[in-house]
Every structure is written in C-alpha cells, then in structure tokens.
Image: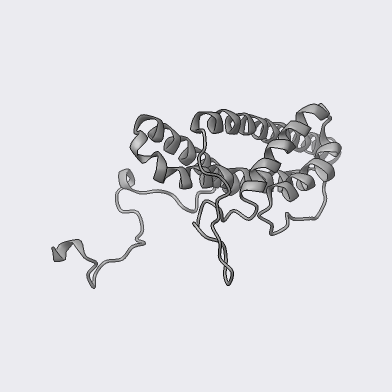
C-alpha cells in the first residue's frame, strides 16, 4: 500500500533519461505551433476514445472541448504574431482569452493587408467562433464546473452535446486556421527570399 503513495525521494519533474520515455520541452521548433498542435491532437485522440468507449464520453468531454478551444486561442495568437511580423508592425497579441476579440484583430487588422478571402467564408468562421465564445468566453467553462466567486453558479449553459457534430464543425475551423497558417508561412518565406536576393544583388 505504501509504495503507491508519494515518498520523500519522489521528484515529479526530472530530465529525460531514456529517449523512448521522454519528451523535448524546449524544442527549438516554432513554440506556438508545437503547443497548438499538441492541444489539437489531444482533442482528436479524446474524441476518438469517446466514440470507441461511450462510457467515458461524459467525463472526457470537458478536456476534449477545452483542448480544442485552447488550440483555437493559440492558433489565433500565433497568426496575429505572424501577421504583424510579416507586415513589419511592432505589435504583439493582447493577453486575451476571448476568441472573438482575437479573431477581430486578425480579421480586421492583419488579414486585409495580406490576402483577400471571400467575405462569406470569414463570416461563417466568425459565426462559429461567436458560438464557441458564447459557450466559453474566458476558457473557463470546460475547466471548472462553477464560475468564479463570490457569486458562483454553474458554468455550463446546456445539458448535452452531439459529439459527432462538434467534431465535424471543429474540423472545419481547423481546416480554415491551418490554411491561414500555411498562407502566411508561405508569404513569409517569399519575403525572406526576396530580401536575400536584394542583399545578394547589392552586397556582392
């Protein structure tokens, strides 16, 4: 029994000893991308497990939705950073959890300066983000069953959720935001190549 309890030699965070059982935290790759992709993949795996093991869907639904929401928030913040950098604007994203406020920054401050996308597509993305934001405005609804004090109340606004429909719609949002990431990354690469060509022409 005692071996199942913490003892005075246990340390929860230790450096990797065997690569097969370790993970690289300070990976030199794009940090925002690693975080957002991690939350997205965790959401996908939880959804798959819920579909295969319906008994767990009533408990895993909370981290499932939280992971996807965290992906959206991180991806929006990353797109804002990438957009400002591409446009040579010295600004940062706001310390904000609201999906719609972050979306408004990306849609109205950055995207018009980079590419023209059909308004109907943007309106539909915004409509779904508004729905998500209404359910979980501050990324707390699926982390806690009650709101902040002192006047606490239930966090959730609905009784049930259709898992298949949620996954179908979230995948469409993911497709859109992955498209945006690829687009800006491509433009950044073209810009870097153009600058490199200019340096080669004038300094060699």
Q: Quadrant of residue 83?
A: top right
Residue found at x 33% / y 46% = 19
133 above or below 55? below
Residue found at x 85% / y 37% = 112
8 above or below 154? below
User: In the drawing, does residue 94 fall left or right of residue 57?
Assistant: right
Q: Nearer the viewer, residue 75 or 19?
A: 75
Q: Position of residue 94 (x, y in %)?
A: 73, 57
Residue 55 is at least partly visible in this image: yes
Q: Position of residue 32 (x, y in %)?
A: 60, 47
Residue found at x 48% / y 42% = 64
- Image quarter of the C terminus: top right
162 above or below 146? above
- Image quarter of the N terminus: bottom left
User: In the drawing, does residue 72 fall left or right of residue 65?
Assistant: right
Residue 117 is at least partly visible in this image: no
Q: Position of residue 178 (x, y in %)?
A: 64, 33
Q: Nearer the viewer, residue 143 or 30?
A: 143
């Amino acid at each position: 029994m005692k071996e199942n309890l913490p003892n005075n030699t246990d340390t929860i965070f230790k450096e990797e000893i065997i690569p097969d059982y370790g993970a690289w935290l300070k990976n030199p790759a794009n940090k925002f991308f690693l975080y957002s992709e991690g939350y997205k993949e965790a959401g996908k795996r939880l959804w798959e497990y819920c579909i295969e093991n319906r008994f767990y869907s009533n408990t895993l639904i909370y981290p499932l939705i939280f992971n996807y929401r965290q992906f959206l928030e991180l991806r929006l913040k990353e797109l804002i950073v990438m957009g400002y950098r591409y446009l040579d604007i010295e600004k940062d994203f706001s310390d904000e959890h609201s999906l719609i406020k972050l979306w408004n920054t990306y849609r109205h401050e950055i995207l018009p300066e980079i590419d023209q996308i059909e308004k109907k597509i943007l309106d539909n993305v915004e409509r779904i983000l508004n729905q998500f934001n209404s359910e979980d405005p501050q990324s707390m609804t699926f982390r806690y069953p009650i709101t902040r004090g002192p006047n606490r109340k239930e966090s959730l606004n609905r009784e049930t959720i259709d898992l298949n429909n949620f996954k179908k719609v979230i995948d469409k949002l993911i497709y859109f935001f992955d498209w945006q990431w690829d687009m800006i990354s491509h433009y950044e690469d073209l810009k870097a190549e153009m600058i490199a060509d200019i340096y080669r022409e004038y300094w060699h």
